[in-house]
Image (cartoon, rainbow, N blue to C red):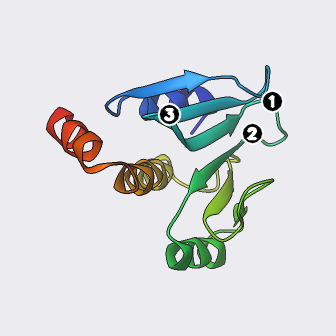
Amino acid sequence: MTPAELGDFAMGFPEVTEEQPFGPGAYVYKVAGKMFAVVEPDAEPPRVEMKCDPGLALHLRAEHDAVGPGYHLNKRHWNTVLLDGSIPADRIEEMVEHSYERVVAGLPKAVRERLAEAR
């Protein structure tokens, strides 16, 4: 999966915005103002940081060499995934969706309900 494909997939969820608060080179995807993915297309290899359940994060790190603790983020709750082609696109999409859902779960009830209706 390319960084552009990942960005397109992330933008398919309700109320997602794409921003560059860290300047060029890092695309931040947010839902209701909360970050759920950071794509770095210019890194070598390109990578994405995504929020993850701590237990699942450890499992994914053990399962895939291209998954490690979050870079400059809380390493318990964030994974860095290298977009080097070693992980199938559908598996990365599952990780993106999980990240989105983790962030939505922490939002106020009214916002969660609005997002659920939009899906």
The kind of residue on which mark 3 rests is Gly
Mark 1 burial class by Cα count in 10 Å: few <14, some 14-19, many 20+:
few
The kind of residue on which mark 1 rests is Asp
Q: Name the front one of labels 3 and 1.
A: 3
Q: Name the front one of labels 3 and 2.
A: 3
Q: Is residue 46 above or below residue 50?
A: above
Precedes in sequence: disc 3 or disc 2: 3
Which residue is labeled 2 in the image? Answer: 46
Residue 53 x, y percent position in the rendering: 50, 69
**Mark identifier at residue 103:** none
Q: Is residue 18 above or below residue 29?
A: above
Which residue is labeled 1 in the image? Answer: 42
Answer left or right for 8 relative to 28. left
Q: Residue at x 19, y 44 (%)?
A: 113
Mark 3 burial class by Cα count in 10 Å: few <14, some 14-19, many 20+:
few
The answer to which of 97 and 66 lies nearer the viewer is 97
**Mark identifier at residue 33:** 3
Residue 67 x, y percent position in the rendering: 67, 63
Answer left or right for 92 relative to 20. left
Answer left or right for 111 relative to 103. left
The kind of residue on which mark 2 rests is Pro
Precedes in sequence: disc 3 or disc 1: 3
Q: CA gap, disc 1 to disc 2? A: 6 Å
Q: Which SS class for mark 3?
A: loop
Residue 57 x, y percent position in the rendering: 58, 71
Q: CA gap, disc 3 to disc 2? A: 24 Å
Query: Pointers 3 and 2 in contact (CB under 8 A)?
Result: no
